[in-house]
Amino acid sequence: MSLETASTEFLNVDNVRFAFRCLGPTSGKPLLLLQHFTGTMDSWDPAMVNALAQTRPVIVFDNLGVGASTGRTPDTVEQMAADAEAFIRGLGLARVDLLGFSLGGMLAQVLAAQQPDLIARIIIAGAAPRGGEEHLLAVVEDAFAQDAPDVRLPLFFTPSGASQLAGRAFVARAAARTRDRDPDGGGDVSEPQAKAIIGWCAQKRDGDATLRSIGQPALIVHGSDDTMFPSINAYNMFKAMRNAELILYPDSGHGALFQYPERFVAHCHTFLDN
């Protein structure tokens, strides 16, 4: 079973129906993936997800109001994290690892800080801490203004030839699933998620309090030239956390994990297996 072919399943929690897909072995500690701004299950890179699922259970899902899940998308990171926790506990899982990309990396921080019994290890890719530096709206506006074949090319990758070549390969991989794809969201998803990200980064007085409270092992991965959440965010997270490792990928933007999927998976395996 692969990300391109896995069946979409549904879980009812209270009045919400969560859409999710499971890959990999049926035993072992699951790795739950938390998605980026406006992203759905089909926004993940199959090369990355399928490789991660070679050795462990991997779960991708749509949070409230996103993709095939019902409910209303909240406008705070904290509520999104609470919704993700409800999904995890609704599956009956006692302990999981997290991989959070961008907005998902913010959720991972909250979950790790608030639910140490539930969260074992966290991987944070392309994210910012509470009170961190963000340029979300400016970067998104600039990306759409470039009229690229796919907005993710200027959004996730640097202008270099090598990065753009890797970006085009990623875009092709992400389109490989042709049946039962998640529907794309509109303003009902993008507007509250943008408000959540901007609000998270505006909480300057909270500083490193959330990061200092995270005791679990953490792997922080970032692109060297991320314009949406500059790489200083990754360094600041690394310095504030008690048990973190930091990796910066060269000539890479916000989607560094998609530019270097094999390298990223290798780093994830090493981190999760130790």
Image (cartoon, rainbow, N blue to C red):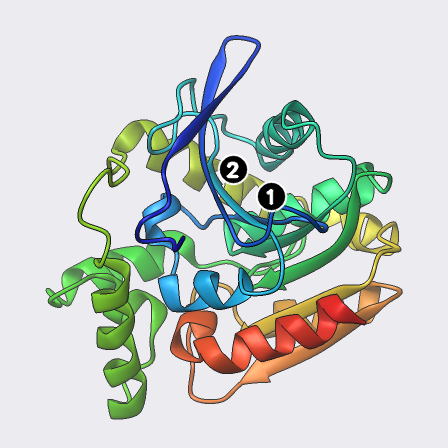
- Residue 258 sits above or below residue 180 on the image: below
Q: Which mark is residue 46?
A: none
- Can you tell which quarter of the image residue 200 is in? top right
Residue 119: where, in percent of width, then height?
77, 45
- Residue 116 sits above or below residue 225 on the image: above
Which quadrant: the C terminus? bottom right
Callout 2–callout 1 Cβ contact below 8 Å = yes
| Count of marks, rendered view | 2
- Residue depicted at x 25% and y 63%: 142
Q: Is residue 207 left or right of residue 230?
A: right
Q: Is residue 83 left or right of residue 93?
A: left
Residue 179: where, in percent of width, then height?
19, 42
Query: Circle 1 sits in a helix, a strand or a loop, which is it?
Result: helix
Nearer to me, 16 or 204: 16
Work out whether residue 62 can be spotted.
yes
How would you rate the neighbour count of disc 2 (Cα within 10 Å): few for under 14, some for 14-19, many for 20 or more? many
**Residue ranking furthest to the top:** 15
Residue type pointed to by label 1: Trp
Query: Circle 2 sits in a helix, a strand or a loop, which is it?
Result: helix
- Can you tell which quarter of the image residue 65 is in? top left
Q: Which mark is residue 196?
A: 2
Residue type pointed to by label 2: Ala
- Residue depicted at x 42% and y 41%: 194
How would you rate the neighbour count of disc 1 (Cα within 10 Å): few for under 14, some for 14-19, many for 20 or more? many
Q: Which mark is residue 200?
A: 1
Residue 117: where, in percent of width, then height?
86, 39
- Residue depicted at x 61% and y 64%: 55
Work out whether residue 226 can be spotted.
no
- Residue 82 sits above or below residue 270 on the image: above
Q: CA distance from mark 2 to mark 1?
A: 6 Å
